[in-house]
């Protein structure tokens, strides 16, 4: 497993991370706690040290499960990244969405009204709550989940800096942010991480955040790099999602798109075979080989997936492999619509 620095924080994190959204269950058709804890332990045993979670993932559930997994000595092996700024207490900030099916482990918890809010007091409360749910003394990376316009970034960054100085967090990150917003953060505090949607189907950061991060020594966490399973070859025409799995209602997973992706994956199979990689490993290896892209967050729910994903952290793709993949992307993915 390759490790890379998180900006100037001094933290070394595995290029392949364990993405803990799906284990929160909500929006993913539920999740099994024991399977999730076993998956986290498998990640830590197989070289993945970076775990990315957030309060909103299952309305606290993902953080609680990560916390249970970190008990008994596992914490020292992990770099824990969480987030703030999507809140379901109060009505400050910008209304983002109402959860229609907050069913956690089969039980309806309640219907949540979610706001984007990055006010200093709210961030502090969120960090305290995350520390408790995770059962840790310090959170290694605290990222603002989505940006909002009611709080100046200088105030948000100022509070995160205070939390860092107090030893409650070790590094500051942002997510779903523009280069201009990152400039605002960096005027006040060191910004060590930017987390954005980036995959072979989502290339926008190549023109924006990736060059910015490379130039300014900000680690770049690619989220949804497997396009939620599509690019792992795990979503063929026969795959059926439960009604509470977000992918059941998303055009991205239409039968036409599934077939298009299968055709694309067949085209890059010779590169996968050359290195003895699965599709998911090849796609993850490609992701962390792109300029500026230091880490890939791979969501997973089972030990089997995690062990497969961890092996992508030692893939070595050369310039010829990367050129062949890019050629196939240009030829095959131009008609991808969602
Ligand atoms: N900052 C943000 O706004 C934001 C947004 C989205 C995600 N994220 C972060 O990024 C992480 C990853 O993104 P994501 O979960 O949306 O998508 P992803 O990593 O592209 O896909 C995850 C899904 O791919 C499938 N998968 C994973 N490994 C596999 C394997 N080895 N073989 C076959 N299938 C495999 C699993 O599907 P099944 O569940 O069907 O098995 C898994 O749930 C999240 O967990 C979260 O930490 C952040």
Image (cartoon, helix red, strand yellow):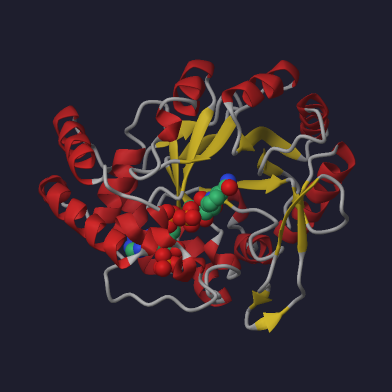
From the viewer's perspective, tell me whether residue 207 is left or right of residue 96.
Answer: left
The residue positioned 35% from the left and 65% from the top of the image is: 254
From the viewer's perspective, tell me whether residue 57 is left or right of residue 48.
Answer: right
From the viewer's perspective, tell me whether residue 236 is left or right of residue 249.
Answer: left
Residue 216 against residue 272 in the figure, above or below: above
The residue sitting at the bottom extreme is 106
The residue positioned 25% from the left and 47% from the top of the image is: 282
The residue positioned 50% from the left and 21% from the top of the image is: 212
From the viewer's perspective, tell me whether residue 197 is left or right of residue 163.
Answer: left
Of 160 and 9, which appears nearest the observer? 160
**Quarter of the image where one finds residue 160:** top right
The number of numbered discs placed on residues in the rendered structure image is 0
Of 322 and 48, which appears nearest the observer? 322
The residue positioned 74% from the left and 60% from the top of the image is: 133
Residue 96 against residue 191 in the figure, above or below: below
Q: Which image quarter holds the N terminus?
A: top left
Image location of residue 24, percent across then percent down: 60, 66
Image location of residue 167, percent across then percent down: 78, 36
């Amino acid at each position: 497993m390759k490790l890379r620095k998180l900006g100037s924080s001094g933290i070394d994190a595995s290029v392949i991370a364990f993405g803990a959204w799906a284990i929160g269950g909500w929006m993913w058709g539920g999740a099994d706690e024991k399977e999730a804890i076993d998956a986290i332990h498998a990640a830590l045993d197989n070289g993945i040290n970076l775990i990315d979670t957030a309060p909103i993932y299952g309305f606290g559930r993902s953080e609680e499960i990560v916390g249970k997994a970190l008990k008994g000595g596992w914490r020292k092996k992990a770099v824990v990244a969480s987030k703030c700024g999507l809140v379901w207490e109060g009505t400050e900030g910008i209304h983002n969405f109402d959860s229609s099916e907050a069913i956690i482990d089969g039980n309806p918890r309640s219907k949540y009204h979610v706001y984007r809010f990055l006010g200093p007091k709210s961030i502090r409360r969120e960090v305290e709550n995350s520390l408790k749910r995770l059962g840790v003394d310090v959170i290694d990376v605290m990222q603002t989940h989505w940006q909002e316009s009611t709080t100046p970034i200088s105030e948000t960054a100022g509070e995160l800096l205070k939390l860092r100085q107090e030893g409650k967090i070790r590094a500051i990150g942002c997510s779903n942010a523009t280069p201009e917003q990152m400039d605002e953060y960096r005027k006040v505090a060191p910004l060590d991480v930017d987390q954005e949607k980036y995959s072979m189907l989502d290339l926008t950061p190549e023109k924006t955040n990736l060059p910015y991060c490379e130039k300014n020594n900000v680690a770049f966490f690619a989220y949804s790099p497997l396009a939620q399973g599509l690019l792992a070859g795990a979503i063929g025409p026969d795959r059926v999602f439960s009604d509470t799995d977000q992918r059941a209602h998303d055009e991205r997973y239409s039968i036409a798109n599934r077939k298009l992706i299968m055709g694309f994956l067949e085209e890059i199979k010779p590169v996968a075979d050359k290195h003895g990689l699965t599709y998911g490993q090849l796609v993850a290896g490609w992701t962390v080989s792109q300029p500026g892209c230091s880490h890939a967050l791979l969501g997973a729910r089972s030990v089997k997936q995690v062990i497969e994903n961890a092996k992508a952290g030692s893939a070595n793709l050369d310039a010829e492999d990367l050129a062949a993949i890019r050629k196939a992307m240009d030829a095959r993915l131009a008609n991808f619509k969602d």
